[in-house]
Amino acid sequence: MPNAASLTERQKKWFASVREGLQRETGRSLDEWAALALACPETTHRKRLAWMKAEFGLGQNRAAMVLNAAFPPVSDWSQPDALAGALWADPQARAIHEAVRAVVLALPEVIVGQRKGFTAYARRLQFCAARPVRQAVLLGLALDPAFDEALRPAGRSGWSERLLSEIVLSAPGDVTAGVAAWVRAAWERS
């Protein structure tokens, strides 16, 4: 389970509902399921997911929760500082991200959700995220790309489907007043 401080209320409710539904609908607690998962002959996460689905009929989210309990990841959401350190290891990308982070954290009620591949920022809902890309930062925003001609439609970035637009920032100086205005507009909509 992720660190509760890095989750929105909506995310906390979702994790709780998945756990409660698992117990209610299967008659087994998460700990009982985790004990069963330890018998899995597979060694990779994807293969273990497939095994849980085939062997027990669990859906994706429930199987992932069970596997996380049975085989706690070495680096996971409950260790946000370790994840951030690994993600932002490149000095150039880290400097750009620090400029983005300063703009984001100047807003009230921001929840930082550190993931393995990106840093997410939410209020009630996720409004932006940052990912390092080739000594730059890809900034995803919960704004329609038509909001500003400098924004491009979001690609397949693996973050929230709420993030409809994105822009690549190549230097800390690229985090301008205009970027701050986009971040604020996305925050206001969350």
Image: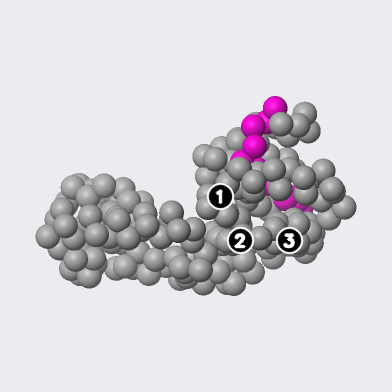
Q: Which residues are magenta?
A: 134-146
Tell me if 141 is positioned left or right of 182 in this view.
left
Marks 3 and 1 sit apart, C-alpha to C-alpha, by: 16 Å
Which tag, 1 or 2, sits closer to the chain's start?
Answer: 2
Quadrant hosting residue 64: bottom left
Amino acid carrying label 2: it is Glu
- Which residue is disc 2 drawn over? 109
Left or right? Give the position of 72 relative to 38.
Answer: right
* Picture layout, residue 145 above or below residue 162: above
The answer to whether residue 138 is magenta is yes
Q: Which residue is mark 1?
A: 126
Task: Please tell me which residue lies in front, 134 or 174.
Answer: 174
Which residue is painted at 71% across and 48% down in the image? 184
Query: Label 2 neighbourhood size at 10 Å, few (<14), some (14-19), many (20+)?
Result: few
Label at residue 33: none
Label 3: how many Cα within 10 Å (few below 14, some 14–19, many 20+): few
Q: Residue at x 61, y 60 (%)?
A: 110
Q: Residue furthest right?
A: 173
Work out whether residue 134 or residue 146 is closer to the camera in this orientation and state it: 146
Q: Secondary structure at mark 3?
A: loop
Could you tell me the amino acid type at mark 1?
A: Gln
The residue tagged with tag 2: helix, strand or loop? loop
Indicate the secondary structure of the residue bearing disc 1.
strand
How far apart are labels 1 and 2 at the CA level? 12 Å
What residue lies at 32% left-to-right and 51% top-to-bottom?
A: 61
Amino acid bearing label 3:
Ala
Residue found 61% across the figure and 43% down from its top: 189
Q: Is residue 79 magenta?
A: no
Residue 22: name its quadrant: bottom left
